[in-house]
Image (spheres, helix red, strand yellow):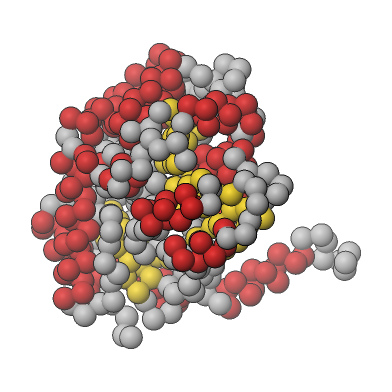
Amino acid sequence: MDVRIGPFGWIEEEAARRAGAGLVRTLRPRSADSPLLDLASNDYLGLTRHLEVTDAAAAAARRWGAGATGSRLVTGTTELHTELERELAEFTGFEAALVLSSGYAANLAALTALTARGSLIASDAGNHASLVDGCRLSRAETAVVPHADPAAVRKALDGHRGRALLVTDSVFSVDGDAAPLLEHAAVVREFGAALLVDDAHGLGVLGDGGRGALHAVGLAGAPDVVATVTLSKSLGSQGGAVLGPAAVIAHLVNAARTFIFDTGLAPAAAGAALASLRLLRREPERAARARHVSASLHRKLTAAGLAAVCPDAAVVSVRAPSAEAAVRWAADCRGEGLAVGCFRPPSVPDGISRLRLTARADLTAAQIEGAVDAIVRTAPPC
Protein backbone atom coordinates (compact mmCIF):
# COMPACT_ATOMS: atom_id res chain seq x y z
CA MET A 1 0.00 0.00 0.00
CA ASP A 2 1.24 3.48 -0.85
CA VAL A 3 1.10 5.25 2.53
CA ARG A 4 1.13 8.63 0.77
CA ILE A 5 -2.42 8.17 -0.52
CA GLY A 6 -3.81 6.39 2.57
CA PRO A 7 -5.93 3.26 2.96
CA PHE A 8 -8.77 4.63 0.81
CA GLY A 9 -6.76 5.82 -2.13
CA TRP A 10 -8.19 2.98 -4.20
CA ILE A 11 -11.61 4.66 -4.03
CA GLU A 12 -10.42 7.40 -6.39
CA GLU A 13 -9.37 4.76 -8.92
CA GLU A 14 -12.77 3.06 -8.62
CA ALA A 15 -14.52 6.40 -9.03
CA ALA A 16 -12.52 7.18 -12.17
CA ARG A 17 -13.38 3.80 -13.70
CA ARG A 18 -17.05 4.31 -12.85
CA ALA A 19 -17.07 7.77 -14.41
CA GLY A 20 -15.36 6.48 -17.53
CA ALA A 21 -18.07 3.84 -17.96
CA GLY A 22 -20.88 6.35 -17.42
CA LEU A 23 -22.03 4.56 -14.27
CA VAL A 24 -21.77 7.26 -11.60
CA ARG A 25 -24.81 7.34 -9.34
CA THR A 26 -25.87 10.42 -7.41
CA LEU A 27 -28.57 11.19 -4.89
CA ARG A 28 -31.29 13.52 -6.10
CA PRO A 29 -33.38 14.79 -3.17
CA ARG A 30 -36.98 15.48 -4.14
CA SER A 31 -39.15 18.13 -2.60
CA ALA A 32 -42.43 17.31 -0.89
CA ASP A 33 -44.30 19.23 -3.59
CA SER A 34 -42.36 18.06 -6.65
CA PRO A 35 -44.13 19.10 -9.87
CA LEU A 36 -42.92 15.98 -11.71
CA LEU A 37 -45.37 13.30 -12.77
CA ASP A 38 -44.07 10.22 -10.95
CA LEU A 39 -43.46 7.09 -13.01
CA ALA A 40 -40.29 6.24 -11.11
CA SER A 41 -41.50 5.16 -7.67
CA ASN A 42 -43.12 1.84 -6.74
CA ASP A 43 -46.31 3.47 -5.47
CA TYR A 44 -48.39 1.16 -7.66
CA LEU A 45 -51.74 1.86 -6.06
CA GLY A 46 -51.18 5.56 -5.38
CA LEU A 47 -51.56 5.06 -1.61
CA THR A 48 -48.42 6.60 -0.14
CA ARG A 49 -50.09 10.04 0.05
CA HIS A 50 -53.64 8.80 0.54
CA LEU A 51 -55.12 10.74 3.46
CA GLU A 52 -56.40 7.60 5.16
CA VAL A 53 -52.93 6.08 5.05
CA THR A 54 -51.02 9.17 6.23
CA ASP A 55 -53.55 9.76 9.00
CA ALA A 56 -53.04 6.18 10.19
CA ALA A 57 -49.26 6.69 10.21
CA ALA A 58 -49.61 9.87 12.25
CA ALA A 59 -52.04 8.27 14.69
CA ALA A 60 -49.70 5.29 15.21
CA ALA A 61 -46.73 7.60 15.87
CA ARG A 62 -48.72 9.61 18.39
CA ARG A 63 -49.93 6.49 20.18
CA TRP A 64 -46.84 4.26 20.06
CA GLY A 65 -44.00 6.74 19.56
CA ALA A 66 -41.66 7.58 16.71
CA GLY A 67 -39.76 4.29 16.84
CA ALA A 68 -40.27 0.67 17.85
CA THR A 69 -37.71 1.17 20.68
CA GLY A 70 -36.08 -2.23 20.29
CA SER A 71 -35.95 -5.54 18.50
CA ARG A 72 -39.19 -7.43 17.93
CA LEU A 73 -38.27 -9.95 20.64
CA VAL A 74 -37.65 -7.27 23.27
CA THR A 75 -39.86 -4.15 23.06
CA GLY A 76 -40.32 -3.74 19.31
CA THR A 77 -43.56 -5.71 18.89
CA THR A 78 -46.70 -3.65 19.34
CA GLU A 79 -50.32 -4.66 18.93
CA LEU A 80 -50.12 -2.97 15.52
CA HIS A 81 -47.42 -5.37 14.36
CA THR A 82 -49.39 -8.47 15.29
CA GLU A 83 -52.58 -7.02 13.81
CA LEU A 84 -50.77 -6.30 10.56
CA GLU A 85 -49.29 -9.80 10.45
CA ARG A 86 -52.67 -11.43 11.04
CA GLU A 87 -54.46 -9.39 8.37
CA LEU A 88 -51.61 -9.69 5.86
CA ALA A 89 -51.59 -13.49 6.16
CA GLU A 90 -55.37 -13.66 5.85
CA PHE A 91 -55.42 -11.35 2.83
CA THR A 92 -52.74 -13.23 0.89
CA GLY A 93 -53.96 -16.71 1.82
CA PHE A 94 -51.05 -17.83 4.00
CA GLU A 95 -51.19 -19.37 7.44
CA ALA A 96 -48.92 -16.84 9.15
CA ALA A 97 -46.79 -13.76 8.57
CA LEU A 98 -43.78 -12.08 10.15
CA VAL A 99 -43.11 -8.35 9.69
CA LEU A 100 -39.53 -7.05 9.41
CA SER A 101 -37.98 -3.63 8.92
CA SER A 102 -37.64 -3.96 5.12
CA GLY A 103 -38.25 -6.27 2.21
CA TYR A 104 -34.47 -6.67 1.99
CA ALA A 105 -34.35 -7.89 5.59
CA ALA A 106 -37.26 -10.26 4.90
CA ASN A 107 -35.40 -11.91 2.02
CA LEU A 108 -32.21 -12.26 4.06
CA ALA A 109 -34.22 -13.73 6.94
CA ALA A 110 -35.98 -16.34 4.83
CA LEU A 111 -32.94 -17.48 2.89
CA THR A 112 -30.52 -17.67 5.82
CA ALA A 113 -32.97 -19.32 8.22
CA LEU A 114 -34.36 -21.92 5.81
CA THR A 115 -31.01 -23.18 4.51
CA ALA A 116 -27.62 -24.14 5.90
CA ARG A 117 -24.32 -25.66 4.83
CA GLY A 118 -25.15 -28.70 2.72
CA SER A 119 -28.36 -27.14 1.41
CA LEU A 120 -28.85 -26.30 -2.24
CA ILE A 121 -30.45 -23.09 -3.49
CA ALA A 122 -31.48 -22.82 -7.13
CA SER A 123 -31.62 -19.07 -7.77
CA ASP A 124 -33.05 -17.43 -10.90
CA ALA A 125 -30.46 -15.37 -12.76
CA GLY A 126 -32.82 -12.37 -12.80
CA ASN A 127 -33.42 -12.28 -9.05
CA HIS A 128 -33.30 -9.07 -7.04
CA ALA A 129 -30.04 -8.14 -5.29
CA SER A 130 -31.57 -8.89 -1.87
CA LEU A 131 -32.15 -12.50 -2.92
CA VAL A 132 -28.63 -12.70 -4.31
CA ASP A 133 -27.21 -11.42 -1.04
CA GLY A 134 -29.41 -13.81 0.94
CA CYS A 135 -27.96 -16.70 -1.05
CA ARG A 136 -24.43 -15.50 -0.34
CA LEU A 137 -25.08 -15.18 3.39
CA SER A 138 -26.88 -18.52 3.68
CA ARG A 139 -23.70 -20.62 3.40
CA ALA A 140 -25.66 -23.00 1.17
CA GLU A 141 -24.48 -24.11 -2.25
CA THR A 142 -26.11 -21.79 -4.79
CA ALA A 143 -26.80 -22.76 -8.39
CA VAL A 144 -27.71 -19.73 -10.49
CA VAL A 145 -30.16 -21.02 -13.10
CA PRO A 146 -31.16 -19.36 -16.40
CA HIS A 147 -33.99 -16.89 -16.12
CA ALA A 148 -37.52 -18.33 -15.82
CA ASP A 149 -36.40 -21.80 -16.91
CA PRO A 150 -38.05 -24.71 -15.03
CA ALA A 151 -36.00 -27.26 -17.00
CA ALA A 152 -32.81 -25.63 -15.72
CA VAL A 153 -34.18 -25.81 -12.18
CA ARG A 154 -34.85 -29.53 -12.62
CA LYS A 155 -31.29 -30.05 -13.82
CA ALA A 156 -29.89 -28.13 -10.83
CA LEU A 157 -31.94 -30.09 -8.29
CA ASP A 158 -31.45 -33.51 -9.86
CA GLY A 159 -29.07 -35.62 -7.84
CA HIS A 160 -28.92 -33.35 -4.78
CA ARG A 161 -29.44 -35.06 -1.46
CA GLY A 162 -30.61 -32.92 1.42
CA ARG A 163 -32.40 -29.64 1.90
CA ALA A 164 -33.15 -27.75 -1.33
CA LEU A 165 -34.90 -24.52 -2.21
CA LEU A 166 -35.84 -22.70 -5.40
CA VAL A 167 -35.87 -18.92 -4.98
CA THR A 168 -37.36 -16.55 -7.53
CA ASP A 169 -39.05 -13.21 -7.87
CA SER A 170 -42.71 -13.48 -8.82
CA VAL A 171 -42.41 -10.39 -11.01
CA PHE A 172 -38.90 -9.34 -11.94
CA SER A 173 -38.11 -5.75 -11.10
CA VAL A 174 -36.12 -4.92 -14.24
CA ASP A 175 -38.40 -5.99 -17.13
CA GLY A 176 -41.63 -6.62 -15.21
CA ASP A 177 -42.01 -10.19 -16.50
CA ALA A 178 -43.55 -12.90 -14.33
CA ALA A 179 -41.97 -16.17 -13.25
CA PRO A 180 -43.59 -19.49 -14.31
CA LEU A 181 -44.67 -20.25 -10.75
CA LEU A 182 -46.85 -23.28 -11.44
CA GLU A 183 -44.14 -24.92 -13.53
CA HIS A 184 -41.55 -24.12 -10.87
CA ALA A 185 -43.76 -25.60 -8.15
CA ALA A 186 -44.19 -28.81 -10.14
CA VAL A 187 -40.42 -29.17 -10.51
CA VAL A 188 -39.53 -28.57 -6.86
CA ARG A 189 -42.18 -31.07 -5.79
CA GLU A 190 -40.51 -33.75 -7.89
CA PHE A 191 -37.50 -33.45 -5.58
CA GLY A 192 -39.19 -32.65 -2.26
CA ALA A 193 -37.74 -29.15 -2.35
CA ALA A 194 -39.37 -25.89 -1.22
CA LEU A 195 -40.33 -22.79 -3.19
CA LEU A 196 -39.48 -19.30 -1.94
CA VAL A 197 -41.04 -16.45 -3.94
CA ASP A 198 -40.34 -12.74 -3.54
CA ASP A 199 -43.75 -11.23 -4.32
CA ALA A 200 -42.69 -7.62 -3.85
CA HIS A 201 -44.03 -6.58 -7.26
CA GLY A 202 -47.06 -8.89 -7.21
CA LEU A 203 -48.73 -7.94 -3.95
CA GLY A 204 -51.39 -5.31 -4.60
CA VAL A 205 -51.23 -5.80 -8.38
CA LEU A 206 -51.76 -9.49 -9.21
CA GLY A 207 -54.38 -11.94 -8.01
CA ASP A 208 -57.94 -11.40 -6.89
CA GLY A 209 -58.07 -7.84 -5.56
CA GLY A 210 -54.26 -7.65 -5.40
CA ARG A 211 -53.73 -10.69 -3.18
CA GLY A 212 -50.50 -11.49 -4.97
CA ALA A 213 -48.97 -13.73 -7.60
CA LEU A 214 -49.07 -16.89 -5.49
CA HIS A 215 -52.74 -16.40 -4.67
CA ALA A 216 -53.40 -15.86 -8.39
CA VAL A 217 -52.04 -19.30 -9.33
CA GLY A 218 -53.39 -21.20 -6.30
CA LEU A 219 -50.08 -21.68 -4.46
CA ALA A 220 -50.74 -19.41 -1.49
CA GLY A 221 -50.92 -21.40 1.72
CA ALA A 222 -49.25 -24.52 0.30
CA PRO A 223 -47.10 -26.32 2.89
CA ASP A 224 -43.99 -26.15 0.70
CA VAL A 225 -44.30 -22.49 -0.34
CA VAL A 226 -42.96 -19.39 1.40
CA ALA A 227 -43.35 -15.82 0.16
CA THR A 228 -41.71 -12.53 0.98
CA VAL A 229 -43.31 -9.16 0.34
CA THR A 230 -42.53 -5.52 0.84
CA LEU A 231 -44.84 -2.97 2.43
CA SER A 232 -43.15 -0.13 0.54
CA LYS A 233 -44.62 -0.66 -2.92
CA SER A 234 -48.34 -1.27 -3.35
CA LEU A 235 -49.01 -0.59 0.32
CA GLY A 236 -47.20 2.74 0.16
CA SER A 237 -45.43 2.35 3.51
CA GLN A 238 -42.15 0.82 4.68
CA GLY A 239 -41.06 -2.63 5.78
CA GLY A 240 -41.30 -6.23 4.65
CA ALA A 241 -42.80 -9.55 5.65
CA VAL A 242 -42.35 -13.30 5.29
CA LEU A 243 -45.50 -15.36 4.67
CA GLY A 244 -45.81 -19.11 5.01
CA PRO A 245 -46.77 -22.09 7.19
CA ALA A 246 -46.99 -21.26 10.90
CA ALA A 247 -44.10 -23.63 11.64
CA VAL A 248 -41.86 -21.76 9.20
CA ILE A 249 -42.73 -18.39 10.71
CA ALA A 250 -42.09 -19.70 14.24
CA HIS A 251 -38.71 -20.98 13.07
CA LEU A 252 -37.82 -17.55 11.66
CA VAL A 253 -38.65 -15.91 14.99
CA ASN A 254 -36.01 -18.14 16.57
CA ALA A 255 -33.42 -18.36 13.79
CA ALA A 256 -33.54 -15.37 11.41
CA ARG A 257 -30.79 -12.95 12.37
CA THR A 258 -32.23 -9.99 10.46
CA PHE A 259 -35.37 -10.41 12.57
CA ILE A 260 -33.79 -11.18 15.93
CA PHE A 261 -31.10 -8.50 15.92
CA ASP A 262 -32.81 -5.66 14.05
CA THR A 263 -34.99 -2.94 15.54
CA GLY A 264 -38.65 -3.54 14.84
CA LEU A 265 -40.54 -1.70 12.12
CA ALA A 266 -41.57 1.81 13.24
CA PRO A 267 -45.19 1.92 14.43
CA ALA A 268 -46.03 4.66 11.91
CA ALA A 269 -45.00 2.37 9.05
CA ALA A 270 -46.97 -0.55 10.51
CA GLY A 271 -50.03 1.65 10.93
CA ALA A 272 -49.77 2.99 7.39
CA ALA A 273 -49.37 -0.48 5.88
CA LEU A 274 -52.37 -1.77 7.83
CA ALA A 275 -54.48 1.16 6.62
CA SER A 276 -53.41 0.52 3.01
CA LEU A 277 -54.24 -3.15 3.30
CA ARG A 278 -57.71 -2.39 4.60
CA LEU A 279 -58.26 0.22 1.91
CA LEU A 280 -57.27 -2.29 -0.77
CA ARG A 281 -59.77 -4.79 0.63
CA ARG A 282 -62.49 -2.16 0.24
CA GLU A 283 -61.29 -1.03 -3.18
CA PRO A 284 -59.99 -4.17 -4.93
CA GLU A 285 -60.38 -2.50 -8.33
CA ARG A 286 -57.13 -0.62 -7.68
CA ALA A 287 -55.16 -3.76 -8.60
CA ALA A 288 -56.86 -4.14 -11.98
CA ARG A 289 -56.45 -0.43 -12.64
CA ALA A 290 -52.67 -0.64 -12.09
CA ARG A 291 -52.48 -3.49 -14.61
CA HIS A 292 -54.62 -1.52 -17.06
CA VAL A 293 -52.30 1.49 -16.82
CA SER A 294 -49.17 -0.62 -17.42
CA ALA A 295 -50.77 -2.30 -20.45
CA SER A 296 -51.79 1.10 -21.81
CA LEU A 297 -48.27 2.50 -21.40
CA HIS A 298 -46.80 -0.52 -23.17
CA ARG A 299 -49.27 -0.40 -26.03
CA LYS A 300 -48.74 3.30 -26.69
CA LEU A 301 -44.94 3.15 -26.42
CA THR A 302 -44.59 0.19 -28.77
CA ALA A 303 -47.00 1.82 -31.21
CA ALA A 304 -44.59 4.75 -31.27
CA GLY A 305 -41.73 2.42 -32.22
CA LEU A 306 -39.98 2.04 -28.86
CA ALA A 307 -38.71 -1.31 -27.58
CA ALA A 308 -40.90 -1.79 -24.51
CA VAL A 309 -41.23 -5.17 -22.79
CA CYS A 310 -44.79 -6.45 -22.39
CA PRO A 311 -45.57 -6.12 -18.65
CA ASP A 312 -47.04 -8.90 -16.53
CA ALA A 313 -47.77 -6.54 -13.63
CA ALA A 314 -47.06 -2.82 -13.13
CA VAL A 315 -43.47 -2.45 -14.37
CA VAL A 316 -42.86 -1.32 -17.96
CA SER A 317 -39.29 -1.53 -19.25
CA VAL A 318 -38.15 0.51 -22.27
CA ARG A 319 -34.78 -0.40 -23.78
CA ALA A 320 -32.09 2.26 -24.33
CA PRO A 321 -29.13 1.99 -26.73
CA SER A 322 -26.49 2.56 -24.01
CA ALA A 323 -26.01 3.47 -20.36
CA GLU A 324 -25.12 7.04 -21.30
CA ALA A 325 -28.20 7.32 -23.53
CA ALA A 326 -30.42 5.99 -20.74
CA VAL A 327 -29.10 8.60 -18.30
CA ARG A 328 -29.63 11.44 -20.81
CA TRP A 329 -33.08 10.11 -21.67
CA ALA A 330 -34.16 10.07 -18.03
CA ALA A 331 -32.77 13.59 -17.55
CA ASP A 332 -34.61 14.83 -20.65
CA CYS A 333 -37.83 13.30 -19.32
CA ARG A 334 -37.34 15.21 -16.07
CA GLY A 335 -36.96 18.34 -18.14
CA GLU A 336 -40.37 17.54 -19.62
CA GLY A 337 -41.91 17.18 -16.15
CA LEU A 338 -41.74 13.38 -15.93
CA ALA A 339 -39.81 11.28 -13.40
CA VAL A 340 -38.77 7.83 -14.71
CA GLY A 341 -36.41 5.18 -13.44
CA CYS A 342 -33.08 4.58 -15.15
CA PHE A 343 -31.60 1.09 -14.84
CA ARG A 344 -28.10 0.31 -16.08
CA PRO A 345 -25.21 -2.01 -15.20
CA PRO A 346 -24.52 -3.36 -12.65
CA SER A 347 -28.17 -3.07 -11.55
CA VAL A 348 -29.32 -5.02 -14.61
CA PRO A 349 -28.00 -8.59 -14.92
CA ASP A 350 -28.27 -8.65 -18.73
CA GLY A 351 -26.17 -5.51 -19.18
CA ILE A 352 -28.94 -3.74 -21.13
CA SER A 353 -29.76 -0.23 -19.98
CA ARG A 354 -33.35 0.91 -19.95
CA LEU A 355 -35.92 3.29 -18.61
CA ARG A 356 -38.12 1.66 -16.00
CA LEU A 357 -41.64 2.99 -15.74
CA THR A 358 -44.02 2.08 -12.95
CA ALA A 359 -47.73 2.23 -13.54
CA ARG A 360 -49.93 3.75 -10.86
CA ALA A 361 -53.59 3.01 -10.33
CA ASP A 362 -54.33 6.71 -9.80
CA LEU A 363 -52.97 7.93 -13.16
CA THR A 364 -55.53 9.55 -15.43
CA ALA A 365 -55.82 8.99 -19.17
CA ALA A 366 -54.44 12.48 -19.75
CA GLN A 367 -51.41 11.78 -17.55
CA ILE A 368 -50.72 8.54 -19.41
CA GLU A 369 -50.86 10.37 -22.75
CA GLY A 370 -48.58 13.12 -21.45
CA ALA A 371 -46.05 10.63 -20.11
CA VAL A 372 -45.92 8.68 -23.37
CA ASP A 373 -45.54 11.90 -25.33
CA ALA A 374 -42.60 13.02 -23.19
CA ILE A 375 -40.84 9.65 -23.45
CA VAL A 376 -41.28 9.41 -27.21
CA ARG A 377 -40.27 13.03 -27.81
CA THR A 378 -37.02 12.67 -25.83
CA ALA A 379 -36.10 9.17 -27.04
CA PRO A 380 -32.46 8.84 -28.18
CA PRO A 381 -31.70 7.53 -31.68
CA CYS A 382 -31.18 3.77 -31.80
The residue shown at (22%, 66%) is: 298
- Where residue 322 appears, x then y in whole percent? 43, 79
Which residue occupies the foreground of this view, 277 or 120?
120
Which residue occupies the foreground of this view, 310 or 150?
150
Quarter in which the N terminus is drawn: bottom right
> Which of the 4 image quadrants contains residue 366?
bottom left
- Where residue 378 appears, x then y in whole percent? 27, 75
Q: Is residue 161 above or below residue 305?
A: above
Quarter in which the C terminus is drawn: bottom left
Which residue occupies the foreground of this view, 30 or 116?
116
**47 relative position to 172: left or right:** left
Which residue occupies the foreground of this view, 208 or 200?
208
The residue shown at (31%, 23%) is: 56
**24 relative position to 139: left or right:** left
Q: Is residue 262 above or below residue 145?
A: above
Tell me if I can see residue 313 in this picture.
yes
The residue shown at (50%, 66%) is: 152
